Amino acid sequence: MPIITVLPNSECCPDGARIEAGVGTSICRALLDAGIEIEHACELSCACTTCHVVVREGFESLGEIEESEEDLLDRAWGLEPQSRLSCQALLADRDVTVDIPKYTINHAKEKH
């Protein structure tokens, strides 16, 4: 099973983390299942950018990016060439390292 290394994020993962997740699992679902409360205002439906992450290692191993995700990413805060919506980035058989940006364009943080 691939390992997701989460770089430290002062709000939702201050010490960083290493979690194991199954192939085909979205990064967002794996983080949530591990107790890392990444924002996800649209309930993982690819309708917002609150779960935006930057994939520092393993980007090319993730599932193919679709046009709807690319369109939304254009609105994400801190967009980088290796940005993905974590609800749409499906794990393959390689480890990945992700960085959760400090800010999102979400105006009202929701509790899930």
Image (tube, helix red, strand yellow):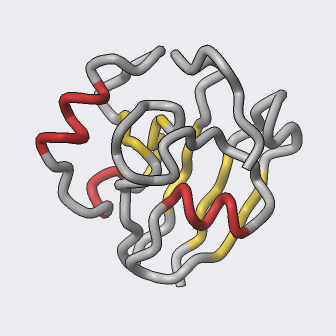
Q: Looking at the image, which residue is at 52% across and 16% down?
A: 105
Does 68 sit left or right of 111 as displayed? Answer: left
62 above or below 71?
below
Q: Classify 64 as above or below 25.
A: above
Instruction: Identify the residue at horizontal 57%, vertical 43% (top origin).
Output: 40
> Is 66 situated above or below 32?
above
Relative side of 52 to 20, left or right:
left
Where is 56 relative to 76, above or below?
A: below
The residue under the point 25% across, 40% down is 69
Q: Position of residue 2 (x, y in %)?
A: 52, 76
Near-viewer residue (48 or 77) = 48
Q: Residue at x 67, y 44 (%)?
A: 38
**Image-quadrant location for residue 111:** top right
Give the farthest residue toward the left. Answer: 67
Where does the image place residue 6, in percent across and percent down from the top left?
67, 49
Total labels: the figure holds 0
- Where in the figure is residue 109, as x and y percent of width and height? 70, 27
x then y, percent, for residue 29:
56, 64
Along the horizontal axis of the image, is 62 left or right of 43?
left
In the image, 16 versus 29, the foreground residue is 29
